[in-house]
Amino acid sequence: MTIVKINLHKVHAERELNAKGGQVSINNNVSIKNVEDMGFGVEGRRGLKFTFAFNCNYEPNLGKIEVEGQVFYVDEEPKIAEIKKGWEKDKKIPMDVMEQIINAALHKGNIQAIKISEEVNLPSPLPLPKVRSGSPEKTATAEKVAEKTEKAVEKIAEKSAEKGTE
């Protein structure tokens, strides 16, 4: 069960210039479009290419970002045969493999979407962390805790010094 590589072959962003401002809803979606042999094998192991599509839609009609690529996956021959058979039969993938593939596609898709959203002036598809200063009460409380901690450390140091001189 190893993801070897993730390649992208399509990155597309579009922003509607005439869109009205207001509340923006961002919907992210990832899907597996195809599963095929990688055409490689090494001592009982084979590989598969999972083609994925990551879409980020900004509503109401503000824009969209599309990322497509392939996740290269290697495993034991029996597991690969099981995955391939399930996909060919009813487009299903075992949950343990699906989880790895979807997480890899989400990771790569979200990173690309964040980068390209900035270029076309769309909001980031994921909330980015922000630093906020604390309120005066929180700052005062934090200072009191720091003072008490410092005093406790001093007492421990004093007791250690006393034991050392005995």
Image: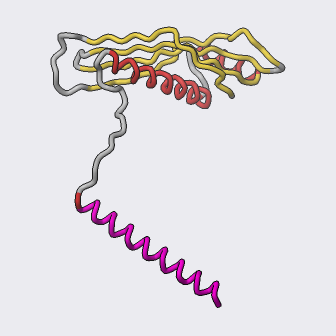
Q: Quadrant of residue 66?
A: top left
Q: Quadrant of residue 72?
A: top right
Residue at position x 46%, y 76% from top? 152
The foreground one among 101 and 80 is 101
Whether residue 164 is in magenta: the answer is yes
The foreground one among 66 and 46 is 66
Furthest residue toward right: 43
Q: How is the image coloured?
A: secondary structure
Where are the magenta residues, as a range? Answer: 137-166
Q: Does residue 128 lie above or below 101 as drawn?
A: below
Instruction: Return the x and y of residue 165 as percentages of the image width and height.
Output: 63, 87
Q: Quadrant of the N terminus?
A: top right
Residue at position x 38%, y 17% from top? 116
Residue at position x 47%, y 15% from top? 53
In this rendering, would 20 be left or right of 137? left
Whether residue 146 is in magenta: the answer is yes
Instruction: Return the x and y of residue 121 as percentages of the image width and height.
Output: 28, 18
Q: Quadrant of residue 117?
A: top left
Instruction: Return the x and y of residue 81 as percentages of the image width and height.
Output: 72, 18
In this rendering, would 137 be left or right of 130? left
Q: Main secondary structure of the magenta part?
A: helix
Q: Does residue 127 lie above or below 136 as drawn?
A: above
Furthest residue toward front: 165
The foreground one among 165 and 150 is 165
Residue at position x 28%, y 60% from top? 138
Q: Does residue 104 lie above or below 156 as drawn?
A: above
